Amino acid sequence: MRWENLSDGPRGAAADAALFGADAVTTRTDTPGFRGITFHEIRAKSIVNRVPGASRMPFEWTVNPYRGCTHACVYCFARKTHSYLDLDTGLGFDSQIVVKVNAPELLRHRLASPRWQGEHIAMGTNVDCYQRAEGRYALMPGIIEALRDHANPFSILTKGTLILRDLDLLRQAAAVTDVGISVSVGFVDEQLWRTVEPGTPAPGRRLEVVRTLSGHGIGCGVLMAPVVPFLGDHPDQLRATVRAIAEAGAASVTPLVLHLRPGAREWFMAWLAEHHPHLVRRYERLYADGAYAPKWYQRRITRHVHDLAREFGIGPARAGTARRIPEPRQPLPAPEGTQLTLL
């Protein structure tokens, strides 16, 4: 395994000194309840990372306490980052988890620096900070406490229900700074979920997180991602998903079509060839120009989801009020200022 000169970017990219040295790594392969999972516990040298200027992300700073993810989503764009450690981007990404055990203390130190200007920090942008490993290592409470104590704005994107463990801390933080929570639910089709996101909580359980957070006065949006071409993009599937999101009381919904970056692309296409071989050629044509589906396809999905969002009344609402869709279903007028945002 390659720990030397580890950075948060590919080899050859401009990077500072190594984030940690090989002598700072403790490897555990026999953790109770985590059969088949290897944890590499490290003491990182830094935890607040600047997003590359060329990134499409709407934020500049991130915190990622883990590398690798037991969610095992076959499409995960972060798979490529495991290759920077000479680790496998397939099963290795799902089972070789790097844990930055000193993340909370590093963050607190950074926030206390006179050079830090209180910029927004995004979490869950690389791998899920509420994946199963968080149940063992409990890094997020210390991270949220540091952000709360410094009244530093932050956002979290997750598929994990473990976020509810930290509900009280999130409420405390929201009382002193801007806190944005988004839950990722790309579809409610359970058969699709079991095959492409086998290590995640079921979509219905994630929507219960949305309902619970909303019920406690914490606005929660849904990142409807990924919309999987030819497997999760049928109009009936999109309608069922947006309807479920609305019923959960989501403050916003943002669709995002599957993208296949290097590392993730190879793993996903191998999965596709095994489970849906008749779709391989269609995917090769759809993604012939790169990692992203054509603009016309993205616009079609976005327009359809936005229309459904207006029908079901998703938009700003009074805190704690969950939306209930009447039966029989009737189109509802869109409230003013309907919000369709990422975080």
Image (spheres, rainbow, N blue to C red):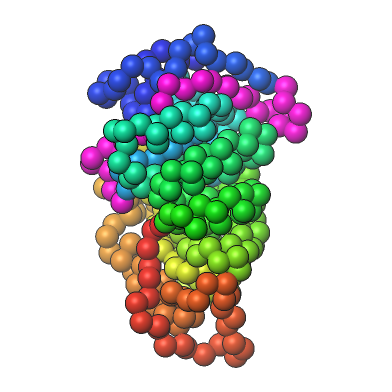
Q: Residue 18 sits in which quadrant? A: top left
The percent position of residue 61, horizontal first and vertical second, equals: 34, 41
Q: Residue 231 versus residue 223: which sits nearer the camera?
A: 223
The percent position of residue 199, horizontal first and vertical second, equals: 63, 44
Q: Is residue 36 magenta?
A: yes
Q: Is residue 222 magenta?
A: no
Q: Residue 129 versus residue 227: which sits nearer the camera?
A: 129
| 55 lies above or below 185 | above
Q: Is residue 53 left or right of residue 125?
A: left
Q: Is residue 78 visible?
A: no
| 155 lies above or below 94 | below
The range drawn in magenta is 30-58
The quadrant in which the C terminus is found is bottom left
- Of helix, strand and loop, which mostly describes the magenta segment? loop
Q: Residue at x 48, y 43 (%)?
A: 149
Q: Is residue 31 visible?
A: yes
| 184 lies above or below 11 | below
